[in-house]
Amino acid sequence: MVNITEKIKEIEDEMRRTQKNKATEYHLGLLKGKLARYRAQLLEPGPGAGSSGGAGFDVSKSGDARIALVGFPSVGKSTFLSKITKTKSEVAAYSFTTLTAIPGVLEYGGAEIQILDLPGIIEGASEGKGRGRQVISAAKTSDMICMILDATKKAEQRSLLEAELEAVGIRLNREPPYLCLLPPFLIPANLKSRNIYLKPKTAGGMKITFQTPPKNLDQKMVYNILRDYKILNCEVLVRDENVTVDDFIDVIMKDHRKYIKCLYIYNKIDSVSLDFLDKLAREPHTVVMSCELDLGIRDVVDRCWEELKLIRIYTKRKGVDPDFNEALIVRSNSSIEDVCDQIHRTLKDTFKYALVWGASARHVPQRVGLGHIVADEDVVSIVSNWRA
Ligand SMILES: Nc1nc2c(ncn2[C@@H]2O[C@H](COP(=O)(O)OP(=O)(O)OP(=O)(O)O)[C@@H](O)[C@H]2O)c(=O)[nH]1
Ligand SMILES: [K+]
Ligand SMILES: [Mg+2]
């Protein structure tokens, strides 16, 4: 069996050799489609995928969310874990100090977040270099990736790591593609280019419709790629002019894609100039810190919490103060109904009203119904109709 890694390399070489122009764009589109398919195969356990296959490290999920620490060797991942949790992960000045996944628990106002310290990854990780594939599989299981970067190292470190994660189907800080039926001018900018519909059928050939013709995609390209994937009967609807070949391939490969939030954390800012620091801190989804000088750690942790978009609710019984060491965790934009469901499956059946103290209440306490949207750190008291 021809090695998949070799096939991937061949395609990558060919893409590099091929000049980008109107005449080659069909060929390049097709190569991108093939590349995506081989890369997915590489992650599947079985022949040709290498012995480690797609398996990650054996750490079970716990707590309200999981954050994976991903980065090159010796950027300070383990130092950071040891700062924010009670777990001590070995720290040293040499690369690959950490050899497996080390879980720790970050306690945040009654919420518990599992933090996974991982071995450092290097270029080529997505193709199995080092423990790359295992690290990436572990990252794929997380609710958020904290990409730890060394502020003293070259800017390319960030794009190199992003490329490794992209190569295995992880999409950072992006929305999954989906068809939105709103009129185009009402669709938020971040969702626009992801506006694609693909439905495989059993017969009838391909029906491809472009509502507004995309600038960098045409029917022939869509047709060629679908044929290469052996999807010969289907309905395709593309609604936005900004849709690209890559977006289209993501839709075909949707079962192999994972859309994860990423916070870029620059460590070791004790060793860079103030000007440079200022520049780093202004980048999107980015925070800076120095584990060594204990600078900015609290802000980084607060930012992690914000990015997870979770909400802590403290429940209160009549006449008793709430316990702020124990929070009920719900997603942002949750209602009192979601809070009830989190407490007990049948609680809303006997629900009468709720009293709310906190940011979501217009006055305290506010008496609200099941539809009321709660805010982080609200105190909620549920009043039920008890029936015999
Ligand atoms: N100057 C400076 N050094 C730091 C800082 N944080 C960590 N270090 C040092 O960086 C080195 C690597 O730290 P580790 O925590 O082992 O890094 P790691 O990313 O876990 O490394 P691997 O497990 O090998 O991938 C150690 O010598 C730390 O003392 C920092 O904020 N500033
Ligand atoms: K190290
Ligand atoms: Mg380490």
Image (spheres, grey):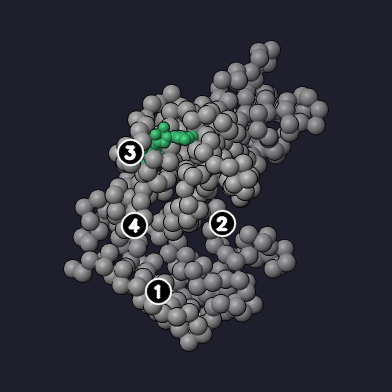
Helix, strand or loop for disc 3:
loop
> Which residue sits at x=51%, y=85%?
22
Q: Which residue is mark 4?
A: 124
Label 2 residue SS: loop
Residue at 54% over, 62% down: 177
In the picture of the structure, the residue carrying the numbered disc 3 is 94
- Compared with 32, 100 (above or below) is above
- Assess disc 1: are there few (<14), some (14-19) or many (≥20) residues with their C-alpha within 10 Å of its C-alpha: few
Ligand 2 resides in the quarter of the picture at: top left
* Residue 265 position within the rendered picture, expressed as x and y whole percent measured from the top left: 52, 42
The front one of 328 and 68 is 68
Are the residues at dot 4 and dot 1 in contact (C-beta closer than 8 Å)?
A: no
Marks 2 and 1, how far apart at CA: 28 Å
Q: Nearer the observer, disc 3 or disc 1?
A: 3
Residue ID for mark 1: 16
Horizontal and vertical percent position of residue 372: 71, 37
Q: CA distance from mark 2 to mark 4?
A: 26 Å
Label pair 3/1, CB-CB below 8 angstroms: no
Indicate yes or no: mark 3 CB to ligand 2 under 8 Å: yes
The reply to whether discs 2 and 3 touch (Cβ–Cβ < 8 Å) is no
